[in-house]
Amino acid sequence: MGTEISIEAVRQFRCFQELQDWEAGVVAGLLEEIRLPAGEVLFRQGDPGDSVYLLVSGKVRIRMAGPGAGERDVAQLAAGAIFGEIGLLLDTPRTATATVEEPAVLWRISQPAFQTGLRRVDTWTHKFVLAAAQVLARRLELAGRELTALAVEQVTELPEVRRTSTQAADLDELRRRLFTEWSF
């Protein structure tokens, strides 16, 4: 663990701002500090989703590859960002690649530390899960708007450039799946 992390530093992340001193101290004790130079890949799409990262300083670019397409930028993160939560929450492989754009200091919370906090009903895990749910809900809302705009574009394009009916059906199926599978 090396560097001691203060409770004030932990509170720079919105989801931990309201923790009591002792709770922020618990979080500080779980954090592993990582320092990476520009150009370093923190994780790749498909790697195990075994931890979440808190970006203390620097910049990290998030890129995602799709079937039959190259990688595409989806976000550039700055200090205060938390990422890698999907793999941690779902116990699934990474959904994107994270590359350091500017020298970065990150804090890592491992899957075992997170699971232990959940089992003990630690307040910090509940605050973290609530914050993650809010961020994921905003991302889902944005994806819904983008899918709706694409669907409208499909219908209104000129006939000579209209996509195939299979592509339109695939887009509609994706929209349907995103907004009708609510079981959890």
Image (cartoon, rainbow, N blue to C red):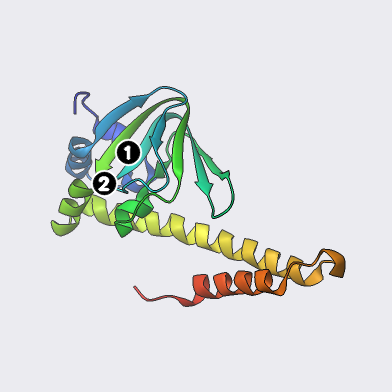
Q: Secondary structure at mark 1?
A: loop
Residue ID at (68%, 71%) = 168
Compared with 92, 103 (above or below) is above
Quadrant hosting residue 161: bottom right
* 158 displayed left or right of 28: right
Task: State the residue in front, 132 or 60.
Answer: 60
Image coords of residue 2 (percent x, y): 19, 24
- Point out the tag, 1 or 2, that comes first from the N-terminus: 1
Image coords of residue 158 (percent x, y): 86, 67
Compared with 103, 23 (above or below) is below
What mark, if any, has residue 19 been given in the picture? 2
Task: State the residue in front, 40 or 110.
Answer: 40
Task: State the residue in front, 63 or 110.
Answer: 63
Residue ID at (24%, 30%) = 6
Image coords of residue 39 (percent x, y): 47, 26
Q: CA distance from mark 1 to mark 2?
A: 8 Å
Whether the residues at callouts 1 and 2 have beta carbons within 8 Å, the answer is yes
Quadrant hosting residue 51: top left
| Furthest residue in direction left, as rendered | 120
* 68 displayed left or right of 107: right
Residue ID at (51%, 58%) = 138
Q: Quadrant of the C terminus?
A: bottom left
Q: Secondary structure at mark 2?
A: loop
* Residue hosting label 1: 11
